[in-house]
Amino acid sequence: MKRAVVISGVTALALALGAGVASAKGGGKGGHHGARINFEQLDANGDGQITKEEMAAHAQARFAEVDTNGDGMLSAEELAAASERATAERTKRMIERKDANGDGVLSLEEMQPESDRADRMFERLDTDGDGAISQAELDAKKGKRKGKRGDADEG
């Protein structure tokens, strides 16, 4: 159970970081990179810290939101509908890459990154080692990513 919480949490965190970077860059060609997730959405209890448990809950809620037919699986159609950037080919490749049991749809478990990778990502963001990520820690990581990509300052 703990492993599933960590994995789910990091998936939500990855979405949040991606959305933050996309937001800082002004989005893509269409100005939007899928659902934007902000710190407050992840900080469910409003204490100014994002825990692995909060991230897991957010990832599960997002999965349920995308799973429009409620069958506990994400089809190519559901994935495409959830992302403005998704093309049929991109969705097909993602399903082929992640579909461990070959049933043509993705479960919550199949959507998760490897647990070691998830743990490392959380630890990199939790720079003070307190088991939670603050807004300042998240902002610092966004700033580093922005600088690595050679983006101009936007204020």
Image: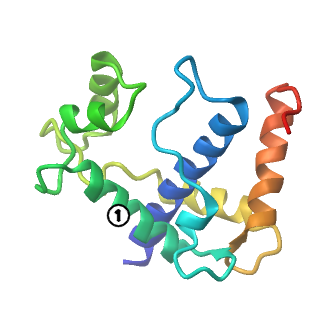
Report the residue at 81% width, 64% height from top: 136
Look at mark 1 in the image and give the residue it sits on: 60
Q: Amino acid at mark 1?
A: Gln
Q: Position of residue 22 (x, y in %)?
A: 63, 35
Q: Is residue 28 left or right of residue 67?
A: right
The residue lying toward the viewer, choosing from 150 and 44, is: 44
Q: Is residue 60 left or right of residue 16?
A: left
The residue lying toward the viewer, choosing from 63 and 122, is: 63
Local SS, label 1:
helix
Q: Quadrant of residue 29?
A: top right
Report the residue at 12% width, 40% height from top: 103
Q: Residue furthest front?
A: 155
Q: Quadrant of residue 86?
A: top left
Q: Is residue 68 above or below residue 105?
A: below
Q: Is residue 46 above or below residue 75?
A: below
Q: Position of residue 88 (x, y in %)?
A: 27, 19
Q: Is residue 140 left or right of residue 3?
A: right
Q: Is residue 40 left or right of residue 48?
A: left
Q: Is residue 66 above or below residue 124?
A: above
The residue lying toward the viewer, choosing from 118 and 87, is: 87
Report the residue at 17% width, 57% height from top: 72
Disc 1 crowd rating (10 Å Cα; few below 14, some 14-19, many 20+) is: some
Q: Position of residue 106 (x, y in %)?
A: 23, 45
Q: How is the image coloured?
A: rainbow
Can you say which quadrant of the picture contains the N terminus? bottom left
The residue lying toward the viewer, choosing from 46 and 63, is: 46
Report the residue at 18% width, 44% height from top: 101
